[in-house]
Image: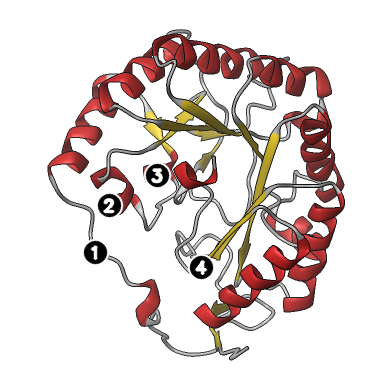
Amino acid sequence: MHKVEYPIHNNEGKSSEKSVSRPHWLKVKAPAGENYTKIKSMMRSKSLHTVCEEAHCPNIGECWHSGTATFLILGDTCTRSCGFCAIKTGRPGDYDPHEPLNVAVSVKQMGVRHAVITSVNRDELPDQGSYIWAQTIIKVRELNPETTIEVLIPDFKGDLECLQRVLDARPDILNHNIETVPRLYLRVRPQAKYDRSLKVLEYSKLKGFKTKTGIMVGIGEKFDEVIDVMKDLRAIDIDIMTIGQYLQPTKDHLPVDRYVHPDEFAEYKRIGLEMGFAHVESGPLVRSSYHAEKHI
């Protein structure tokens, strides 16, 4: 493996160089085109949110041009303050009870064959937002019986009753992101727990669901730590894994530790497939929903 690292920050999170431009493999075209404009207009007309926009995804132009989007339900304000995430943190307002139907209608109008749904964390709600989760899956299925459904869920604070409510709605793929290695959880995901996320995935797998998870690299992890996470995931028989480059959304978020070379991503994929993952999507621009339609 040709392992090349591009150091950006030291361990204190301060820039170790005056300025370092992104390598060429991370440069993408600005979003544009008729489909992009159409989808954006549709989302605004129904007061819907997409994680594509909220998380500043670099693939938004490619995905929206092809007519796919990842719907963000339960509002655009998260109760958690993860160090990597561009979605705003705060006290969310009331959720929209019509949101499940609005998402289902949008999926139909877009002609989506594989719908991806995710949400903010709603830790303040007694059911963690799981009722709206279940209703969204049900409504999308009712209006789009030929569409497969992938859900990228929060951990519901480990409440298995909430998780089961989502599983009872029968999504086709259950995705919950590990995000990073255990050593970095306190810094990257301060209100989450590595073992709790593993239990969410394990419970879903034991219930017979196709399971998926993803992590970011370039946020301070070591190569061997990524491999150890992959081993933990295979130990509970996770089917699909995504690995992508962390990109700092704003100056207030965690700094990029390094730009990971494409050869290292290729090595993660090779090792993952040898371990037994059914599918490994690994590359600088990979995000949880990137090429999601291929994972089904």
> Residue flagged by tag 1: what amino acid is it?
Lys
Mark 2 nearby-residue class (10 Å; few <14, some 14–19, many ≥20): some
Q: Which mark is residue 29?
A: 1
Secondary structure at numbered mark 1: loop
> Residue flagged by tag 2: what amino acid is it?
Gly
Q: From the viewer's perspective, is 63 left or right of 289? A: left
User: Mark 1 to mark 3: distance in Å?
Assistant: 15 Å
Mark 3 nearby-residue class (10 Å; few <14, some 14–19, many ≥20): many
Image position, residue 212 (x, y; %): 66, 44
Q: Quadrant of the C terminus?
A: top right
Residue on which the image places disc 2: 61
> Is label 2 in contact with label 1 (beta carbons under 8 Å)?
yes
> Residue flagged by tag 3: what amino acid is it?
Cys
In the image, what residue occupies the spot 58% across and 91% down? 2
Q: Nearer the viewer, mark 2 or mark 4?
A: 4
Indicate which disc, 3 or 2, sits on the residue closer to the N terminus: 3
Q: Quadrant of the N terminus?
A: bottom right
102 vs 68, nearest the viewer: 68
Q: Which mark is residue 52?
A: 3
> Residue flagged by tag 4: what amino acid is it?
Gly
Secondary structure at numbered mark 2: helix
Residue on which the image places disc 4: 283
